[in-house]
């Protein structure tokens, strides 16, 4: 019992250390500027966005009604995982900002399309994606869940 | 003793990975807990109920286009605890854009999986290389391809194999919100020495079935029952073609239909019998083991409070070349095993701030010309996943 408690304390300690010392600056995703956009995809591309991360999938989305075109940052790995096409309707929830002071842009937190919700970030803007996901989808079928 | 050492190693390794991951500045940590319940754990006519809890973690660290990742999982069975298993994986991947419309993804992973007691012969070392390319031919059409290589060594070496697989797909999106996709697969799996004389230490009686898992197992449990004493390996070559039709119905509903036809081009399963067990990734029962077809449909609905609902039905008709059906008295029926299966899935998922929760129900009705595999079963899963991001809000 003591040993288990020790292991649990060790694990929690690791997490606390990680949270305390691994935390970096938070200056990109602004929760206060969140907005929801319903629109249609105009273009899809891969662009470098942040230092120390892979290039991002960026979607140009024309808002229904206003026809304002937003650059919507998705994530690095989702370029492989999700197949977006020009003309598809999307609902995006994310942090709004003006790139270069003039281009309406959204850092996507959540995308809704084809009856699905894709959670790209949590409500504080922290990414949900991680390494190995693409490969994982290709071969980790059923493991850990009911493998049928 | 073996299991104790294994579990101890797993605990120490998992803790070390979590510690090093956080201390060295991992970007994300994900934890998930899934609890499963079923009335037919071993998926045969001798239904056996059990509950399974699965705990898993994953960590990753980005270095520009590279990322390193590690994951581990531990599954505990409440009634059949001797099937409990754990696995650990380490890997790296690389994502590189080739122009604005094409991207290359490469990953390399290594993993170890350990089962307890009866299933320890399925303990394996896995090395996996994966290369994928995705390209927008134009704004409404995507070409995808990937290649994977798997090398696997089991404790019971008659299951050792390596395999190659190539996948190619192309889709087209139409303004009617319709997506049409076609896929081609080719694969080659080579069992390195499936005929070598080797006792596989399984006690079938404990699981309610009477036959062994391979030529190396008989109903007695550990006495080999070979069909051949050849020493060379055996290869199986397969190819498949799939068509998928997806239709958006408004922004909150999606519907898709798919059909897959698979052929065994050469070779056949070198084992006497094939089984699929929950948790045991059986080397003789995978997509190289059958020819036939699968068809399925799925409805996805985005419900109020952003609850995702998925309802699906899948049917398959598979024949297993090289696998003979037996009567319940263990008499060969001199027919090749064929299974016809219907499956219903229902899944509800809700994503909260940092966790997501889901409940999943499946009903499977499997009809087989081998009476041991005439079965049905109910499967319920409840789970949640928690993500913690150590880094900044990119």
Image: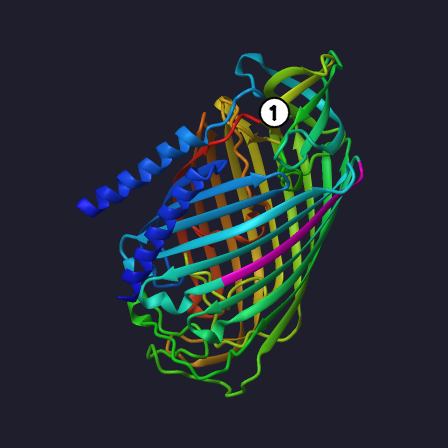
Instruction: Give the residue drawn at x 41%, y 39%.
Output: B31
Instruction: Give the residue drawn at x 27%, y 55%.
Output: B79
So how many labels did they put on this image? 1
Q: Quadrant of residue B41?
A: bottom left
Q: Quadrant of residue B179?
A: top right
Examine the rendered structure and indicate whether residue B51 appears above or below residue B63: below
**In magenta stretch: residue B137:** yes
Q: How far across and down, in percent of the image, does residue B95 sit?
A: 66, 43
**In magenta stretch: residue B326:** no
Residue named by callout 1: A108
* Viewer-proximal residue among B182 and B190: B190
Q: How far across and down, in percent of the image, does residue B331 sit?
A: 42, 81
Say left or right for A11 vs A82. Answer: left
On the question of residue B208 being in view, the answer is: no
Q: How far across and down, in percent of the image, does residue B20 sit?
A: 42, 43
Instruction: Give the residue drawn at x 55%, y 54%.
Output: A139
Q: Kindly state the secondary structure of the residue where label 1 is placed.
A: strand
User: Magenta residues: mostly which secondary structure?
Assistant: strand
On the question of residue B188 being in view, the answer is: yes
Scheme by which the image is coloured = rainbow
Q: How far across and down, in percent of the image, does residue A3 sit?
A: 21, 47
Say left or right for B161 vs B384. Answer: right
Instruction: Give the residue drawn at x 30%, y 56%.
Output: B8
Q: Quadrant of the N terminus of chain B?
A: bottom left
Please give the chain letter of the residue carrying mark 1: A
Query: Local crowd at mark 1 within 10 Å, few (<14), some, or many (≥20)?
Result: many
Q: Quadrant of residue B103?
A: top right
Q: Which residues are magenta?
A: B126-138
Say left or right for B309 vs B45. Answer: right
């Amino acid at each position: 019992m003591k040993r288990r408690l020790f292991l649990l304390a060790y694990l929690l300690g690791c997490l606390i250390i990680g949270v305390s010392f691994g935390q970096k600056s938070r200056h990109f995703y602004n929760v206060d500027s969140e907005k929801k956009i319903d629109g249609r995809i105009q273009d899809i591309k891969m662009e470098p966005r942040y230092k120390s991360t892979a290039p991002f999938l960026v979607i140009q989305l024309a808002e229904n009604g206003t026809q304002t075109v937003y650059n919507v940052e998705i994530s690095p790995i989702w370029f492989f995982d999700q197949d977006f096409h020009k003309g598809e309707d999307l609902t995006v929830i994310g942090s709004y900002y003006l790139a270069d002071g003039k281009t309406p842009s959204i850092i996507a937190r959540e995308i809704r399309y084809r009856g699905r919700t894709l959670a790209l970030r949590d409500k504080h803007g922290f990414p949900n994606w991680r390494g190995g996901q693409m490969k994982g989808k290709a071969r980790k079928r059923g493991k850990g869940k009911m493998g049928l | 003793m073996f299991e104790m050492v294994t579990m101890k190693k797993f605990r120490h390794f998992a803790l070390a990975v979590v510690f090093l991951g956080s201390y060295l500045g991992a970007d994300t940590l994900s934890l998930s807990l899934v609890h499963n319940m079923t009335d037919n754990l071993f998926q045969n006519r001798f239904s056996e109920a059990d509950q399974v809890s699965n705990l898993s973690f994953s960590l990753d660290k980005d270095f520009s286009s590279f990322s390193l990742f590690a994951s581990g999982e531990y599954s505990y069975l409440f009634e059949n605890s001797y099937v409990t298993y754990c696995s650990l994986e380490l890997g790296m991947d690389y994502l590189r854009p080739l122009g604005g419309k094409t991207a290359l993804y490469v990953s390399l992973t290594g993993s170890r999986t350990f089962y307890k007691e009866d299933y320890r012969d399925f303990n394996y070392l896995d090395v996996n290389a994966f290369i994928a390319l995705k390209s927008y031919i134009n704004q409404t059409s995507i070409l995808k391809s990937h290649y994977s290589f798997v090398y696997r060594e089991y404790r019971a070496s008659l299951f050792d194999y390596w395999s190659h697989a190539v996948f190619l797909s192309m889709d087209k999106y139409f303004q009617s919100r319709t997506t049409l996709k076609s896929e081609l697969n080719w694969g080659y799996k080579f069992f390195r020495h499936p005929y070598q004389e080797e006792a596989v230490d399984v006690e079938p009686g404990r699981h309610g079935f009477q036959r062994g898992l391979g030529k190396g197992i008989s109903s007695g449990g550990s006495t080999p029952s070979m069909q051949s004493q050849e020493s060379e390996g055996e290869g199986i070559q397969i190819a498949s073609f799939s068509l998928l039709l997806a239709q958006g119905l408004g922004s909150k509903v999606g519907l898709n239909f798919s059909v897959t036809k698979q052929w065994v081009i050469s070779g056949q399963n070198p084992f006497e019998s094939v089984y699929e067990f929950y948790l045991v990734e059986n080397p003789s029962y995978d997509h190289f083991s059958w020819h036939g077809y699968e068809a399925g449909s799925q409805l996805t609905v985005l419900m109020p409070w952003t609850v995702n609902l998925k309802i699906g039905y899948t049917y398959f008709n598979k024949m297993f070349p090289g696998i003979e059906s037996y009567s319940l008295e263990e008499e060969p029926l001199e027919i090749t095993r064929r299974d016809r299966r219907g499956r219903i899935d229902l899944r509800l998922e809700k994503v909260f701030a940092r966790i997501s929760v889901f409940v999943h129900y499946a009903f499977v009705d499997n009809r087989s010309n081998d009476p041991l595999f005439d079965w049905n079963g109910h499967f319920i899963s409840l789970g949640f996943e928690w993500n913690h991001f150590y880094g900044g809000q990119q």
